[in-house]
């Protein structure tokens, strides 16, 4: 135990100090020494030590239940520990994104976003509140302080972050937000405060692909210091320059990105005992797949390639490594799967499907991508019969047996044992050719040890519960899997197993996911939801689509530039010779702030009108009136938004 005792440990261990590495001249932002954490007889980690130098971007990898979130909570001062110490550089500012952030129910989105001890952030929050409430006296009082702290630029940057994360309704109470919206509000708050050290727990959960790619670029810029837990392997590969792994209560460090980690981890596993054979086989396949990706191949030095081929030869000499592959024989599926004919679905003015037609092929593996709110989850609920279309028909083949993994499908009796949850569904699963797996063997394949199987559900971590839910779907032996965000909260080892399962699955698959890496490994065809019932079919995986989209956008820009080269040159010349951009006058600043309030009020009226339109309780005259008003509101919002953009360019 810490000599300071239980009550004083956080004060003692979070003392401020300046560290310098003995081997190189660098500042250490965070150092943890000899950390041990246990819950009763369960030891998560012991005598664990790590440090985080300035500018280092570190990812933490471990199986679900190994203590990743617990470790982050300890480092952020949210949770106690048994022995050891945690020390930060003197005066460092730390921002922490929790896995499941919580806010007081009575505060607004604005209060949650700007909830920070930083003077500038708190001033902006007070100013925004005064503007929103129409308190002109308070607004006038705060204006000189905004100028003194140069808060205008800061506020503009904050609003850019909020807009990138699709946070626009500042006055909405946080109690009305979904879990995903709360996570984005919390992420925005952490980024806005611009801390020296970011600690992030699953930052890409609940972000659509556009947001994820924006965050990826944002975190790569500058000399940011970062410690995070994430399952997004492209994110890991492109953002992080160090990976630490907790395995069997020990910590292993890998100085490099995810591709390098795979290489060096495989070497370590190969040198360990045969008990690690299964995990080694999975990561060998993962490494092989990464090697075949263009972005991985382009960055590898020749020495690393040579090292890999040597490793490959060693692996070839081993025997029996392929027998761990789980090739489940899915229920028979006929040639008719499903046919969508002239399907329509909308909520008020929000169109999801409009004259949608599609014939699903046997053994097709389809991915569905698109920004949040474009109707992806609604589409698969229509497909599985959870929601009825407004018009049109969906004909499902007689042999189709759906296995539906939903985002909100975790409904277990916490007092049941893990093994009983699965046995209540099926005692065994067929592998074909007369081979069968018992419920216990099936759970073990998905990393539930015999000890864990006879433990109670309430003792599982969030990720382990997700894994159990996945097992409860798969053991039903469906022939058509519909997976809605299956990768959230799953560790990378489990994702490897699930990917292997789906690649050999003898049935149909539809996956809705923002995990680009997962989609690339599993699907061969995409439906791209662009919003407003604009749905495009694309033959290929996510990386194929991004490459095609990038080339198309580049060609469009080239064609546009080629049409008016003289005008382009004149524009460049005028920009060079133009005087310094004029700043907003006091009156324009007032107009700028009022526009934000007016746009939000119009957006709220539009949302209220759309809700009434979809209520089903309006008369024909009322329907016409609300429909006309929504069209007017859209025009007013566009006009005021254009003026807001004009003024924002002068900030």
Image (spheres, rainbow, N blue to C red):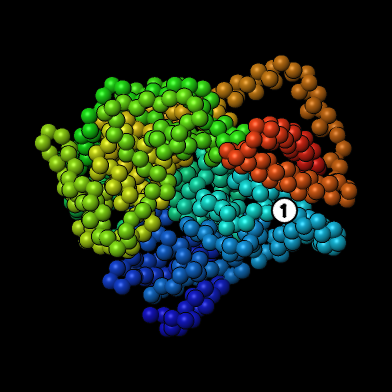
Q: Position of residue 145 (x, y in %)?
A: 81, 62
Q: Position of residue 523 (x, y in %)?
A: 38, 31
Up the image or down, 287 lies above or below 158; here it is above
Up the image or down, 577 lies above or below 318; here it is above
Furthest toward the left, the residue is: 434
Q: In percent of the image, x 39 and y 70: which residue is there?
A: 35
Q: In percent of the image, x 89 and y 48: which residue is there?
A: 587
Is residue 58 at all visible to an observer of this figure? no
Up the image or down, 175 lies above or below 624; here it is below
Q: Position of residue 332 (x, y in %)?
A: 22, 29
**Would you call the spot at circle 1 few (<14 residues within 10 Å), some (14-19), or many (20 or more)?**
some
Q: In percent of the image, x 34 and y 27: which residue is there?
A: 396
Up the image or down, 262 lies above or below 390; here it is below
Q: Quadrant of the N terminus?
A: bottom left
Q: Is residue 508 left or right of residue 68?
A: left
Q: In percent of the image, x 54 and y 35: which residue is there?
A: 374
Determine the secondary structure under disc 1: helix
Between 184 and 299, the one lying in front of the other is 184
Between 309 and 488, the one lying in front of the other is 488
Q: Position of residue 435 (x, y in %)?
A: 12, 39
Q: How many marks?
A: 1
Is residue 32 at all visible to an observer of this figure? yes
Q: Quadrant of residue 146?
A: bottom right
Q: Is residue 9 left or right of residue 423?
A: right
Between 608 and 505, the one lying in front of the other is 608
Residue assigned mark 1: 154
């Amino acid at each position: 135990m810490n000599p300071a005792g239980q009550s004083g440990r956080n004060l003692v261990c979070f003392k401020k100090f300046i560290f310098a590495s003995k081997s190189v001249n660098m500042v250490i932002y965070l150092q943890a020494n000899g950390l041990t954490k246990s819950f009763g007889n369960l030891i998560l980690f012991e005598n664990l030590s790590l440090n985080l130098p300035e500018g280092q971007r570190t990812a933490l990898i471990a199986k679900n239940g190994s203590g990743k979130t617990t470790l982050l909570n300890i480092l952020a001062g949210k949770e106690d520990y048994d022995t050891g110490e945690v020390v930060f550089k003197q005066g460092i500012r730390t921002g922490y994104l929790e896995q499941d952030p919580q806010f007081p129910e009575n505060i607004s989105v604005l209060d949650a976003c700007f909830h920070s001890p930083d003077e500038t952030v708190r001033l902006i929050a007070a100013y925004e509140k005064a503007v929103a409430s129409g308190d002109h006296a308070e607004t006038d009082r705060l204006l000189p302080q905004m100028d003194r702290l140069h808060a205008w630029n800061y506020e503009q940057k904050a609003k850019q972050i909020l807009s990138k994360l699709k946070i626009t309704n500042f006055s909405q109470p946080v109690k009305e937000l979904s879990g995903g919206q709360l996570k984005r509000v919390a992420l925005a708050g952490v980024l806005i405060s611009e801390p020296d050290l970011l600690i992030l727990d699953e930052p890409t959960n609940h972000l659509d692909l556009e947001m994820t790619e924006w965050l990826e670029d944002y975190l790569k810029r500058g000399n940011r210091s970062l410690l995070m837990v994430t399952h997004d392997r492209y994110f890991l590969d492109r953002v992080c320059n160090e990976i630490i792994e907790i395995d069997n209560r020990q910590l292993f460090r890998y100085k490099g990105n995810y591709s390098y980690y795979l290489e060096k981890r495989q070497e370590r596993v190969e040198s360990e005992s045969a008990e690690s054979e299964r995990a080694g086989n999975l990561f060998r396949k993962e490494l092989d797949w990464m090697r075949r990706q263009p972005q991985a191949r382009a960055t590898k030095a020749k020495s690393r390639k040579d090292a890999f081929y040597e490793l490959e030869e060693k692996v070839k000499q081993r025997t029996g490594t392929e027998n761990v592959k789980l090739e489940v024989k899915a229920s028979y599926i006929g040639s008719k799967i499903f046919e969508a004919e002239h399907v329509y679905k909308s909520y008020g003015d929000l169109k999801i499907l409009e004259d949608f037609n599609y014939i699903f092929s046997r053994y097709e593996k389809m991915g569905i991508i698109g920004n949040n709110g474009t109707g992806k989850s609604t589409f698969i609920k229509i497909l599985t019969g959870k929601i009825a279309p407004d018009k049109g028909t969906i004909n499902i083949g007689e042999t189709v047996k759906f296995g539906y993994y939903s985002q909100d499908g975790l409904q277990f009796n916490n007092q049941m044992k893990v093994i009983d949850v699965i046995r209540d569904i099926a005692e065994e699963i067929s592998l074909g050719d007369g081979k069968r797996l018992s419920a216990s063997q099936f759970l073990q394949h998905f990393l539930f040890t015999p000890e864990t199987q006879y433990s109670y559900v309430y003792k599982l971590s969030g990720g382990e519960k997700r894994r159990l839910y996945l097992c409860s779907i798969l053991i039903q032996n469906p022939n058509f899997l519909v997976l809605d965000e299956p990768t959230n909260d799953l560790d990378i080892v489990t994702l490897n197993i699930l990917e292997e399962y789906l690649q050999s699955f003898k049935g149909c698959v539809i996956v809705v996911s923002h995990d680009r890496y997962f989609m690339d490994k599993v699907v061969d065809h995409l439906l791209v939801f662009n919003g407003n019932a604009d749905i495009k079919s694309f033959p290929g995986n996510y990386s194929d689509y991004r490459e095609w989209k990038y080339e198309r956008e580049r060609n469009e820009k080239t064609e546009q530039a080629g049409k008016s080269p003289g005008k382009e040159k004149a524009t460049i010349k005028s920009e060079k010779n133009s005087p310094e951009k004029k700043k907003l006058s006091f009156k324009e600043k007032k107009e700028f702030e009022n526009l934000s309030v007016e746009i939000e009020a119009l957006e709220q009226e539009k949302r209220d009108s759309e809700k009434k339109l979809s209520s089903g309780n309006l008369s024909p005259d009322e329907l016409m009136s609300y429909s006309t008003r929504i069209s007017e509101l859209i025009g007013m919002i566009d006009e005021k938004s254009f003026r807001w953009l004009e003024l924002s360019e002068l900030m």
